[in-house]
Image (cartoon, rainbow, N blue to C red):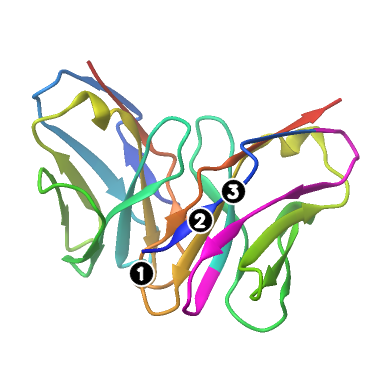
Amino acid sequence: AQSVTQLDSQVPVFEEAPVELRCNYSSSVSVYLFWYVQYPNQGLQLLLKYLSGSTLVKGINGFEAEFNKSQTSFHLRKPSVHISDTAEYFCAVRQNTGNQFYFGTGTSLTVIP
Amino acid sequence: ETGVTQSPTHLIKTRGQQVTLRCSSQSGHNTVSWYQQALGQGPQFIFQYYREEENGRGNFPPRFSGLQFPNYSSELNVNALELDDSALYLCASSSGPVDEQYFGPGTRLTVT
């Protein structure tokens, strides 16, 4: 089974400042990587995904993530956050031969005006 | 195009009871996956249904069961409810077992 570690449970950041949300996974096989966002009382929305190719992946709402195979990491970044980015962010992994997603425990991003 | 819908939105049950949660998949999708999200945790995979057959199961006891219908909508049934079953239950539909999953808003189950 895979495990996904999101090192920061809560990240407060001022509006228009940059942010990085960290994600590490444990796997010795090829994986696909995902970041989802969850707003209060809502389901998950896909921000971006890495399947293959360029290790820098751009997603919606100005977010991007970089896949680092040697460090088994897939950190999420945004150069300038907005109040509307306040939400819970989940990193997820799926083996490229499997159908099961493994999620981290989430990082709560709070953007301070 | 209609997205993934789930019903009911909220549900309160008593320990020992049984519950059925419903999910309508997105148009054109033949696969539904169910997840349990406990408070403060990430979603955990319960099982997946593909073309009306179970296609993979996470670490959940047999009292968690499911169905998928010919129109690809799905049900999650939980028998003998326990307090720890209190959670947000999410379903996700996809155009295939390993394709991108689109999540519904969830059903929040409270067991008292």
**In contact (CB < 8 Å): disc 2 and disc 3:** yes
Residue A15 x, y percent position in the rendering: 87, 34
Residue A9 x, y percent position in the rendering: 61, 37
Please, which chain is the residue tagged with disc 3 on?
Answer: A
Q: Write down the quadrant of residue B10 in the picture.
A: top left
Report crowding for label 1: few under 14, some 14 to 19, many 20 or more residues within 10 A (C-alpha).
Answer: some
Q: Is residue B6 left or right of residue A74?
A: left
In this rendering, the answer to whether B93 lies above or below A57 is above
- Where does label 3 land, which residue? A6
- Tell me if I can see residue B1 in this picture: no
Amino acid, disc 1: Asn
Q: Is residue B40 left or right of residue A71?
A: left
Residue A30: mark in rendering:
none
Q: Is residue A94 left or right of residue B70?
A: right
Amino acid, disc 3: Gln
Give the structural element (helix, strand or loop) at label 3: loop
Q: Are marks 2 and 3 on the same chain?
A: yes
Mark 1 → mark 3, Cα distance in angstroms: 21 Å
Residue A99: mark in rendering:
1
Report crowding for label 3: few under 14, some 14 to 19, many 20 or more residues within 10 A (C-alpha).
Answer: many
Q: Write down the quadrant of residue B41 in the picture.
A: top left
Give the structural element (helix, strand or loop) at label 2: strand
Q: Which residues are magenta?
A: A13-32
Amino acid, disc 2: Val
- Where does label 2 land, which residue? A4
Residue A72 x, y percent position in the rendering: 61, 68
Please, which chain is the residue tagged with disc 2 on?
Answer: A
Please, which chain is the residue tagged with disc 1 on?
Answer: A
